[in-house]
Image (cartoon, grey):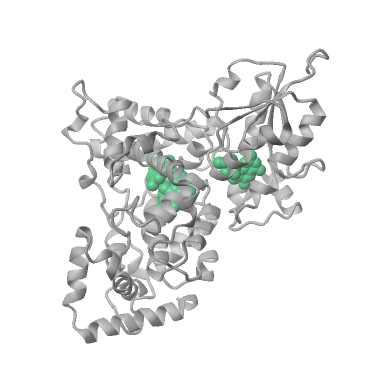
Amino acid sequence: MRSANHINPTLRLVLGDQLNGSHSWFSTVDEDVIYVLMEVQSEATYTRHHIQKILAFFAAMRAFANELRLLGHQVHYIQYDDPQNQHSFEGNIRFLIDEFNVGRIEYQYPDEYRLDQEFKRFSQLFGIPVEVVDSEHFLTTRSEWSTFFKGHSSPLMERFYRHMRVKFRILIDSQNQPFFGQWNLDKDNREKIPVNHVPIAPLVFDNDVSDIHDMTVNMEIPSIGSVDPTRFIWPINRTQALQLLDFFVQNCLPLFGRFEDAMTVNSWSVYHSRLSFALNVKLLTPLEVVDCAIQHWENHQADISPNQLEGFVRQIIGWREYMRGVYWSQMPGYAGLNALNNHRKLPNWFWTGETKMNCMKFAIQQSLQFAYAHHIQRLMVTGNFALLAGIHPDEVDQWYLGIYIDAIEWVEITNTRGMSQYADGGLIATKPYVSSANYIDKMSDYCSTCFYAKSKKTGERACPLNSLYWGFLDRHRNIFEGQFRMKMMYSTLNKMNETQRNALFDQANWYLKHIETL
Ligand code: FAD
Ligand code: DLZ
């Protein structure tokens, strides 16, 4: 308890994705500081979240609050069903200012533009001093990406990644040259899962979050997906996050790069780390994850080839930081981009997985079941279909923002609207990520048990991806035909005779017209 002399405490706001116990805020216990965490409607309903995402955030926030209390910090936690909950950051802070006679507010930079704008108004709204501090999580500042690429017309991730390797001395020798003689070992990756190889079962937790689940039901929080709240699988505290990291380096890292792009009906996560939630809510830092992987590789070089490690490091210090840089340099305009002028609605089966396309069925059903799909499922299955079908990027964004456990706008929108949907006109992706059944079959075992025939382009049971693929190329000829990386595809399309091309486009149009029945 605070002593009676301390009448104007400082309120420090901790958001649901700011669960960073190593933050300098927590290095000393101060009786004049009250930490506040709040479960609010504004966050729980800005999109229709997966139930597991809501539970993961609330459970992790509650666990973090308890850890702070155990360390001696004063914590005020507002539960969703608290009758005094005002259900917005502004409303609750206003209430607490009166309740505790707060003299000052401090917050960490939020990761989302929406909240950044809202919090900038705090000092004007509340009329007391407000200070904002760094969240002490990322390896780059919000503006570093723009500074790095100033004057460059094409901000290539690879260039940024090399800069990060040198800056943080990660897998770099004394001459600033990359270990293994190359920066990027991707050419050794991208293998399909061999027949009879079943990937390791993922480490899942057994958290009982029934009380929180009951509350979400009672409070009628809208959600999608399913859950067993008595055996909640995601890490909800730092100990579990570290266990997941340890499991990854021990069991998945040896095959991470090799099977990074592979998909199989036998596994929902293959050899991926599933660390994105723990990273995004800051239970883990990017540097500790990368250091742990490197250290493990150093001690097990006979079992872990360099391409497995390099691929993983690139995702974290490369792609993750790069996407954050794009987000802060391009928002708010980015959220309205629609370079391909797409307008179709997402078919309803995106919310049920009830489609005859096996690849889509598996990717969507596991997303509903686990709030997770790995990168290639997101990019080359669901993302590919949405792009080929010309779905409006707003629709696609809302789906991705809701369904995944790790979906926070800064990393969701850049991956979805940018990398996957080409809505930014090629700022992130140097070509549209589209494919016919050929790619899906090359990287997965989905096609062999599919209702549709992977090799058929037209006629009954022809895989919809085939005609949609050529239809997409034809529809956007003016944008892509001149692009070097698309040359081969257009050359194939141009070599077809008119009858073949028309049959393909008719088939594509028929599928688009009957999209709900696919
Ligand atoms: P792993 O494959 O094990 O990779 C390790 C880590 O690298 C991830 O945990 C993540 O932190 C980072 N990483 C890998 N790829 C990317 C990337 N493209 N961008 C940023 N970080 C990356 N990631 C999110 O964290 N939140 C999202 O909302 C999100 N939405 C996506 C939407 C689409 C359409 C696509 C194509 C990708 C999206 N990603 C998103 C990126 C990536 O798919 C996920 O980070 C990854 O699948 C998470 O699983 P994992 O932890 O097993 O990753
Ligand atoms: C995702 C989420 C949800 C569902 N609920 C809350 C919440 O009630 N309170 C909170 O502080 N944060 C929540 N979050 C995470 C926020 O949406 C996230 O902090 C912002 O998007 C900023 O990145």
Q: Nearer the viewer, residue 99 or 514?
A: 99
Quadrant placement of the C terminus: bottom left
Q: How many marks?
A: 0
Does residue 46 sit above or below 168 in this rendering?
below
Q: Is residue 391 left or right of residue 3?
A: left
Q: Nearer the viewer, residue 275 or 119?
A: 119
Residue 110: horizontal and vertical position, in percent?
56, 37
Residue at 68%, 34% in the rendered image:
124
Does residue 197 sit above or below 10 in this rendering?
below
Residue 316: horizontal and vertical position, in percent?
38, 37
Q: Residue furthest bottom?
A: 499
Residue 58 lies in quadrant: top right
Residue 462 lies in quadrant: bottom left
Q: Is residue 492 left or right of residue 262?
A: left
Q: Nearer the viewer, residue 130 or 165?
A: 130
Does residue 364 sit above or below 243 in this rendering?
below
Residue 243: horizontal and vertical position, in percent?
48, 33
Residue at 81%, 12% in the rendered image:
5
Residue 338: horizontal and vertical position, in percent?
43, 61
* One can see residue 266 in this view: no
Q: Nearer the viewer, residue 369 or 409?
A: 409
Residue 209 lies in quadrant: top right
* One can see residue 319 in this view: yes
Residue at 32%, 80% in the rendered image:
505
Ligand 2 picture quarter: top right
Quadrant placement of the N terminus: top right
